[in-house]
Image (cartoon, rainbow, N blue to C red):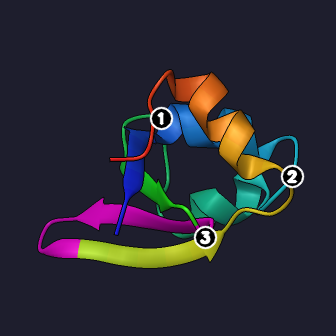
Amino acid sequence: MEFIEMSGKSLLELAKEEGPSPEELAKVGVDDHSVVRINRQGDIEIRRAHGWDLIGGLLGDFETRVRSETGFDWA
């Protein structure tokens, strides 16, 4: 599966437009220093001490927004 990794800070910026709210993301542990990744289906995962946890999903034109925010492509 292909992902784009980013900081929690970048995800919180993306979520302001559409998707889980910054408050919802904070409740599951996302902060500016978190490591998160998003797959092509829009699923958001956060890096925990022992692996990745699925925490939600993005909606809308998230592919363009993710690539624009991070400068990365799917890998």
> Which residue matches tag 3?
41
The answer to which of marks 3 and 1 sits earlier in the sequence is 1
Q: Nearer the viewer, mark 3 or mark 1?
A: 3
Numbered disc 2: secondary structure: loop
Pointers 3 and 1 in contact (C-beta within 8 Å): no
Q: Earlier in the sequence, mark 3 or mark 2?
A: 2
Please tell me whether mark 1 or mark 2 is closer to you in this view: 2
Identify the residue shown where x is 37% and y is 36%: 33
Say if 20 sits above or below 5 in the image: below
Give how far across and how far down residue 74 sits, in percent: 42, 46
Q: Where is residue 72, by image quadrant?
A: top left
Inspect the magenta stretch and tell me whether residue 49 lies in it.
Answer: yes
Determine the residue positioned at 37% across, 45% down: 34
| Mark 3 closeness class: few <14, some 14–19, many ≥20 residues within 10 Å | some
Q: Please, what secondary structure does the residue beneath circle 3 have?
A: loop
Magenta stretch, residue numbers = 41-51
Numbered badge on residue 32: 1
Specify the quadrant of the image occupied by residue 52.
bottom left
The percent position of residue 19, horizontal first and vertical second, equals: 80, 59
Label 1 to label 2: alpha-carbon separation: 18 Å
Q: Residue furthest left?
A: 50
Residue 61 horizontal side relative to residue 9, left or right: right
Q: Contact, CB < 8 Å: mark 1 with mark 2?
A: no
| Residue pictured at 11% horizontal, 74% vertical | 50
> How many marks on residues?
3
Return the mark for residue 53. Answer: none
Residue 17 makes an appearance in the image:
yes
Q: What amino acid is at disc 1?
A: Asp
Residue at which label 2 appears = 18
